[in-house]
Amino acid sequence: MFDADGNAVPVTAITVRPNVITQARTIDIDGYEALQVGEGSRNSSRIAKAQKGQFKDMGFFASLREFRIYGSSLGVGNKIDLSQFTAGDPVTVSAISKSKGFQGVVKRHGFGGGPRSHGQKHSEREPGSIGGGLRTRVPVGMRMAGRMGGERITVKNLKVMHVDSADSVLYVSGAIPGRRGTLVEIVSK
């Protein structure tokens, strides 16, 4: 997108489905203040019996999340939509990053690998030494090959560039974690 000065700004388009407040946690009953928010829809046969009683006439939600909100005026059954955001608002975005499976040290940690000359045969992408000397164990925290991605990532200080209420799309500056279709939490400051 282009900003007011004509600069090209990379943005991510996020489709926003309506969110409904399903439960309000209070200090007296639960020991903390929070709002439980449900979004999406799911077949009623895939909902637990206790949740059917909790949701009553609000519908059956695909996912539930709790947000610690203190002194909120919103109550159970209220809807949260794109009207909460305006262009220029700073937001924090959290999601599960793309899973990449088991990866080597070059991709996972950015190791350089071994030299490509002087008799090196198959050591281009190997990690090299993991610590020798008089130690008889591998040091704690040694970077090695392993599973990569699939972790909760939070990106702070992103900016809302445009709010498209007609198509229910939110345009946020920069990149956000996850693949297409990932459930994303957007919190305005």
Image (tube, rainbow, N blue to C red):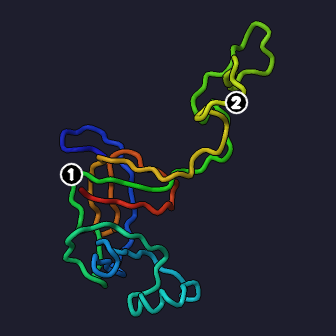
Q: Is residue 135 above or below residue 68?
A: above
User: Which residue is at a point 48% across and 53% down the rendered structure image?
Assistant: 152
Is 8 in front, or is 45?
Answer: 45
Badge 2 element: loop
Within-10-Å neighbours for mark 2: few <14, some 14–19, many 20+: few
Residue 96 percent location from the top left of the image = 50, 55
Q: Which residue is mark 1?
A: 88
Picture quarter containing residue 40?
A: bottom left
Badge 1 element: loop
Is 14 in front, or is 56?
Answer: 56
Task: Tell me which amino acid carries mark 1.
Answer: Gly
What numbered label is drawn on residue 55? none
What numbered label is drawn on residue 137? 2
Is 85 in front, or is 167?
Answer: 85
Q: Is residue 30 left or right of residue 136?
A: left
Q: Is residue 184 above or below residue 26?
A: above
Q: How far, Cα to Cα, is label 1 from label 2?
A: 52 Å
Within-10-Å neighbours for mark 1: few <14, some 14–19, many 20+: some
